[in-house]
């Protein structure tokens, strides 16, 4: 079957119309995704802004004994929850993770039962271009009705060139009574296995407090303690109350919205030109 030039042009226009519809559909999906990302970043910005306000308020508050801090926090949580839950029970659910995050940056005074404890090296950490570990020490604490332990964040330790050789830890004795900040570190749901190595210190792949508690047969509090140290402390403390400030989240939000606007504008321009050309083509075909 031989097509006339007008019929051939008409079929070509139809193919282009189908192609434009496919592109339009993909554009709508992409714009929707960009808007969703922008809304998510904006929400994260508001959450981080609220957290920054809490941290600023806590920075001005004096340090309180760890027992008092956790007791006040537990009262606040139980005023929200219907059931009276312990700190350990709260750490075993998703909602509990959000509650425990509210302790981030809270000043506390911790009384240790002894000056040393089992050390753990959290593997695969980087700082200023160096590969290394975060050093944690499991310490017994006093003041509770039952024996409790807490993991103390002692800072970043640079790794040796050979993985089989662990760094030599040389630390001054930690005072029995120490002031510092509490923070919560959630377990990675995709990789939570402790993978402990029987070395000295113990090398672990994930900071799983429940697994460490089972390994050491101790009751470990679900928060971490970062002592205040002076400039002579040999290891730099990496944890900060906010890894990314709220301004950055708002900036990313504007970026996603801008990309959505630009993509929408380009698609509208291409669609307008296509419709104009198609209308002209159909007019010529009718003639």
Image (spheres, rainbow, N blue to C red):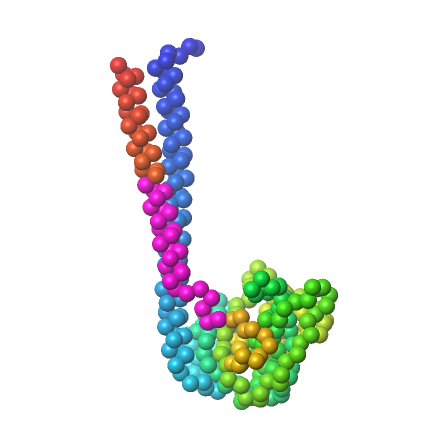
Residue 277: x and y in percent read: 31, 25
The quadrant of the picture occupied by the N terminus is: top left
- Residue toward you, 136 or 67: 136
Residue 153 location, quadrant:
bottom right
Query: Residues in magenta?
Result: 240-265
The answer to whether 67 is drawn above or below residue 100 in the figure is: below
Query: Residue 236 vs residue 80: left or right?
Result: right
- Residue toward you, 173 or 141: 173
The answer to whether 197 is drawn above or below residue 137 in the figure is: above
Residue 214, visible in the rendered structure: no
Q: Main secondary structure of the magenta part?
A: helix
Q: Is residue 76 magenta?
A: no
Residue 200 location, quadrant:
bottom right
Residue 262: x and y in percent read: 35, 44
Residue 166, visible in the rendered structure: yes
Residue 204: x and y in percent read: 65, 68
Query: Residue 76 vs residue 182: left or right?
Result: left
Task: Give the residue furthest to the top.
Answer: 2
- Residue toward you, 194 or 248: 248
The quadrant of the picture occupied by the C terminus is: top left
Residue sitting at 37 percent across and 69 percent down?
50
Residue 119: x and y in percent read: 65, 76
Residue 21 location, quadrant:
top left
Residue sitting at 39 percent across and 38 percent down?
25
Residue sitting at 36 percent across and 18 percent down?
9
Residue sitting at 31 percent across and 36 percent down?
269
Q: Is residue 243 magenta?
A: yes
């Amino acid at each position: 079957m031989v097509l006339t030039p007008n019929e051939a042009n008409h079929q070509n226009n139809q193919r282009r119309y189908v192609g434009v519809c496919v592109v339009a559909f993909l554009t709508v999906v992409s714009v929707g995704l960009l808007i969703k990302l922008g809304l998510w970043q904006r929400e994260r910005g508001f959450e981080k802004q609220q957290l920054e306000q809490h941290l600023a308020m806590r920075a001005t508050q004096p340090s309180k004994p760890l027992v008092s801090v956790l007791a006040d926090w537990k009262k606040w949580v139980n005023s929200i929850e219907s059931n009276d839950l312990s700190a350990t029970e709260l750490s075993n659910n998703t909602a509990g993770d959000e509650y425990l995050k509210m302790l981030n940056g809270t000043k506390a005074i911790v009384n240790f039962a002894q000056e040393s404890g089992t050390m753990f090296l959290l593997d695969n950490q980087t700082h200023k271009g160096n590969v290394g570990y975060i050093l944690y020490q499991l310490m017994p604490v006093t003041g509770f009705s039952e024996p409790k332990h807490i993991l103390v964040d002692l800072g970043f330790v640079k790794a040796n060139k050979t993985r089989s050789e662990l760094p030599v830890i040389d630390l001054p004795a930690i005072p029995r009574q120490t002031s510092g900040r509490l923070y919560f570190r959630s377990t990675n749901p995709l990789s939570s296995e402790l993978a402990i190595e029987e070395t000295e210190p113990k090398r672990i792949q994930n900071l799983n407090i429940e697994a460490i508690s089972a390994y050491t047969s101790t009751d470990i509090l679900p928060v971490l303690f970062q002592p205040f140290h002076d400039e002579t402390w040999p290891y730099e403390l990496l944890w900060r109350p906010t890894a990314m400030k709220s301004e950055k989240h708002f900036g990313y939000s504007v970026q996603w919205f801008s990309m959505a606007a630009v993509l929408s504008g380009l698609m509208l321009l291409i669609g307008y030109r296509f419709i104009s050309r198609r209308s002209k083509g159909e007019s010529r075909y009718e003639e």
